[in-house]
Amino acid sequence: MESPRRLLIVDDEYGIRLSLRGILEDEGHEVFEAGDAETALSFLEKESVDLVFLDIWLPGMDGLAALEIMRATRPSMPVLMISGHGTIETAVNAVKKGAHDFIEKPLSLEKVVLAVERALEFQALKQENTELRARLDMRDIGGPMGTSPVMVQLREQISRVAPLDTCVLITGENGTGKELAARALHHAGRRSGKAMVAVNCAAIPDELIESELFGHEKGAFTGADGPRAGKFELAHQGTLFLDEIGDMSLKTQAKILRILQEKSFERVGGSKTLRADVRVIAATNKNLEAAMASGEFREDLYYRLRVFPLHVPPLRERGDDVFLLADYFTASLAEELGLAPVSFAADASGALRSYLWPGNVRELRNFIERMLILYPGRTITFADLPPEITTGAAPAVEHTATGAAGDFKSARNAFEAAFLAQKLQEYGGNISRMAEAVGLERSYLSRKLKTYNLHGG
Ligand SMILES: Nc1ncnc2c1ncn2[C@@H]1O[C@H](COP(=O)(O)OP(=O)(O)OP(=O)(O)O)[C@@H](O)[C@H]1O
Ligand SMILES: [Mg+2]
């Protein structure tokens, strides 16, 4: 049998609600009721349900008008119209407008159960389809997303918002993968067959931004010796990726805002009005709230861009994903560079897990590339690691025990290495003070430090 679902009945007739509720509850579903469209819509603003039964004739707003709003606000929620004698034609119309199906009064047990089953099955298939497509496209964009909770959540958000034309604002530190997230959004969306055009807002001088974005006609300014299409035109029916949006001048911000509001523009020096059918994705590593507070970023533009905010978390918050990414880069870069892959000993793995990776995924990628060049085909130990990774980090000790792969002994070694590195840093390399603080004999501690190639100062 189906797993229990949340269903909403919208009908002004008490008798219909009562009999429907009876049937649905017997099937194990959780049932909510509304006597009119307004009540139903305000309920749906706060709660989500898996299926709606919607009567066509209702006091106040009618079923068709309510359907339209539900389609707009909850596009994936199936709606079953309830139709009486005089409203079959309307019901057929409703299906054309996006209702999943309709059932005719009088409602029989069989009719209702079958209709619910079909609607939910259809819904599940559609969901599965979207997820599958999103997952496939993730692979296409070149790299694993990760399995840490923060990344699973990010992936979920991406597949949820990708099929819509909603404007997305991606935030995150340097090198976390903001551009990658933008590409994933584009590829999992309806516009994937069209272009994704990227504009680096920080790199374009003010006086050129207009012609860069909108294009220009021949002779529009000195140097414009031929007509040229701008980024908005090139991205028509596709996606426009506005990167480094936090680095735009106020003047440029005003221009961008105008086009986002009006959805039309003219080429510089041109008179024809062109329409911009683009989905906008913006990204920044700046704190836009702070920039707004100091008057460096327009509030109206901020709210227009941030319809759906996506945050790409720093690598240090992604737990074991660091290993997943390290493996991925090891394999892909080894092949690209024609070098034998490297592997990491447990103590080295522990350090990779503890290191804070201020440059995030990009830094990890560059680090792996360096290791491949220096130690092709080798197992890299703690001693081989560059100093910024072994000592420049404040290791997150509580994480390292789970961070090391494999057997107990390697896990313990990894933990010890990370713990000692952190303490060594904390006590500025003073082994006597450190020994006292951690409760070890100084000579024993010295030997330990030597094992892990850690040096006091
Ligand atoms: N999940 C991932 N899988 C594989 N590679 C990744 C992943 N995330 C990021 N990268 C790689 O890391 C590098 C940085 O990613 P990207 O350019 O998307 O980051 P960014 O946040 O836009 O950086 P910046 O702030 O510098 O603009 C790229 O080489 C990208 O391919
Ligand atoms: Mg970027």
Image (tube, rainbow, N blue to C red):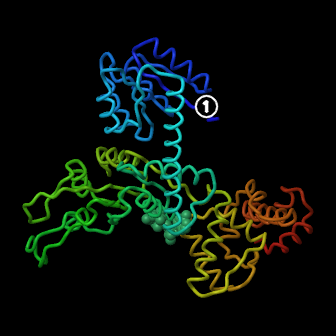
* Mark 1 residue type: Pro
Residue 81 visible within the image: yes
Left or right of 301 on screen, residue 162: right
For the point 28% across and 68% down, the residue is 204
- Residue that mark 1 sits on: 4
Q: Residue furthest top?
A: 14
Residue 265 percent coordinates (x, y): 16, 57
Image vertical order of residue 111 relative to residue 238, above or below: above
Tell me: is circle 1 under 8 Å from ligand 1: no
In front here: 264 or 187? 187
For the point 40% across and 57% down, the residue is 283
For the point 35% across and 61% down, the residue is 241
Left or right of 362 on screen, residue 263: left
Residue 109 percent coordinates (x, y): 54, 23
In front here: 317 or 405? 405
- Quick check: which quadrant has ligand 2? bottom left
Residue 431 visible within the image: no
Quarter holding the C terminus is bottom right
Q: Residue furthest bottom?
A: 338
SS at circle 1? loop
Residue 43 percent coordinates (x, y): 44, 24
Quarter of the image for residue 447 reads bottom right
Image vertical order of residue 282 relative to residue 105, above or below: below
Quarter holding the N terminus is top right
